[in-house]
Amino acid sequence: MEKLERIFLGLIIGAVMPILLGLISFMVWFFTGQNPDTPLIYLVSGVLAGLILDLIFLKRWIDNRYAMPLWVVISIYVFYNIVLFGMFMGLPVLNVLLGLPAGFYMGNRVVFNSVPVNQYQAITKHVSLFTGFMMLLICTASAIIGLREEGIGQTIQSMLGVSFEITKPMVWGIVLIGGTLLVLCKVTLTGITMKRTIKASVV
């Protein structure tokens, strides 16, 4: 079980630098002329640089995965939220799933660091609220982008395959109700995952 956990978290931690440096390299290409012959060279160079860093430091990072400063953990979590948000062009639904690794990691972290049992509930609540707050920011960004788009009602209408017109008030209703449900799902998913991880780790 510990081996699988190391592999799972190792993949999450190890993917950060290749993705980050790949994106930075691509942005450098984008803002320095956009030569049509070189985007892949920039992208691959950044990814390779990240893989080299992984080759040097990843084992140490995995060995100290539960001793990492919280700001590093939070930065990784925020990073993946932004990446997933961008990959799906502002659609925030799949960001809910990031509650799973967040709850899994923090559940193992509190057990590994011998946090007193009477603090489990409070920490679980704080972690769940934080992931919910992150989801709220993602949903807000998605709403701002979507509501500023011309013809957003028609886009939603075609996505849902309905015959009636999607009006502006209906769009607002979808944004508010859908966003609220996504935030609640994220909080619940994080909390359940963390509680079950703690229970499994303690046993």
Image (cartoon, grey):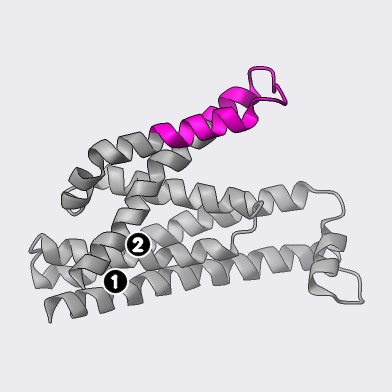
Mark 1 = which residue? Answer: 194
37 inside magenta stretch: yes
Q: Quadrant of the N terminus?
A: bottom left
Q: Which residues are magenta?
A: 25-49
Estimate the x, y position of residue 130 in percent, counting from the top left. 37, 57
Magenta segment, principal secondary structure?
A: helix
| Mark 2 surroundings: few (<14), some (14-19) or many (≥20) residues within 10 A | many
How far across and down, in percent of the image, does residue 177 sit?
64, 70
Q: Position of residue 199 (x, y in %)?
A: 19, 80
SS at badge 2:
helix
* Residue 106 visible in the shown view: no
> Dot 2 corresponds to which residue?
102
Cα distance between the residues tagged 2 and 1: 8 Å
Horizontal placement of 10 versus 97: left or right?
Answer: left
Residue ID at (30%, 58%):
9
The answer to which of 177 and 12 lies nearer the viewer is 12
Question: Between disc 2 and disc 1, whose residue precedes?
Answer: 2
Looking at the rendered structure, the number of numbered marks drawn on it comes to 2
- Relative to the observer, which residue lies in front, 8 or 111? 8
Whether residues under marks 2 and 1 lie with C-beta atoms below 8 angstroms apart, the answer is yes
Indicate the amino acid at tag 2: Ala
Give the quarter of the image for residue 34: top right
Percent position (x, y) of residue 66?
18, 54
Quadrant of residue 51 within the rendered picture: top left
Q: Residue furthest top?
A: 32
